Amino acid sequence: MEYSYNIFDKNPSRLAMILANNCRKRRLDKGMSRRSLSEVTGIPEPTLERFETKGKISLEAFLRLVVEFDWFDEMSSILSSSKFTTGEELETINKNQGREKGR
């Protein structure tokens, strides 16, 4: 099944399935079976199957896939920049840059 995502669709389950589908495509592009990916990453085969079919996976296992598929730089870049939608939000972000603790 092919999944697409647009900026107005904020459904985490749909996004999880898109990520899972992209990982499955990457695995197949590399000529890897679930078993061989499991051996390389240490992620159990049933976990890989559950991710590819239902979009469910732990953060740690997902990050192992990020490293294996060489997406580390892209993920780091996405998560390192502050994102805002309003001027007020931008002001708050600028004011809080460098904070190390919450309130």
Image (cartoon, helix red, strand yellow):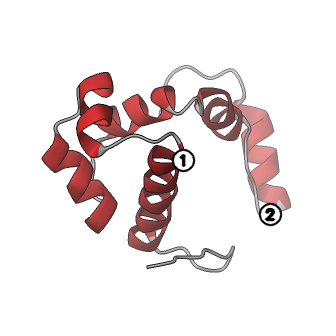
Find the residue positioned furthest to the right: 87
12 left or right of 34?
Answer: right
- Image coordinates of residue 16 in percent, x first then y, are 42, 62
Asked if marks 1 and 2 touch (Cβ < 8 Å), the reply is no
Q: Looking at the rendering, which quadrant does residue 99 occupy?
A: top right
When the figure is inspected, residue 3 is found, relative to residue 77, above or below; the finding is below
Percent across and percent down for residue 66 are 49, 34
Which sits in the foreground, 90 or 30? 30
Instruction: Residue 23 in the image: state x and y as whole percent.
Output: 46, 50
Residues 12 and 33: in front is 33
- Above or below for 98 versus 63: above
Residue at which label 2 appears: 86
Q: Nearer the viewer, residue 34 or 21?
A: 34
Q: Amino acid at mark 1?
A: Asp
Q: How many marks?
A: 2
Task: Identify which amino acid the numbered label 2 is placed on.
Answer: Thr
* Label 2 SS: loop
The N terminus, quarter of image: bottom left
Point out the tag, 1 or 2, that comes first from the N-terminus. Answer: 1
Which disc, if any, is residue 29? 1
- Per the model, the C-alpha gap separating discs 1 and 2 is 40 Å
**Percent x, y of residue 32:** 39, 40
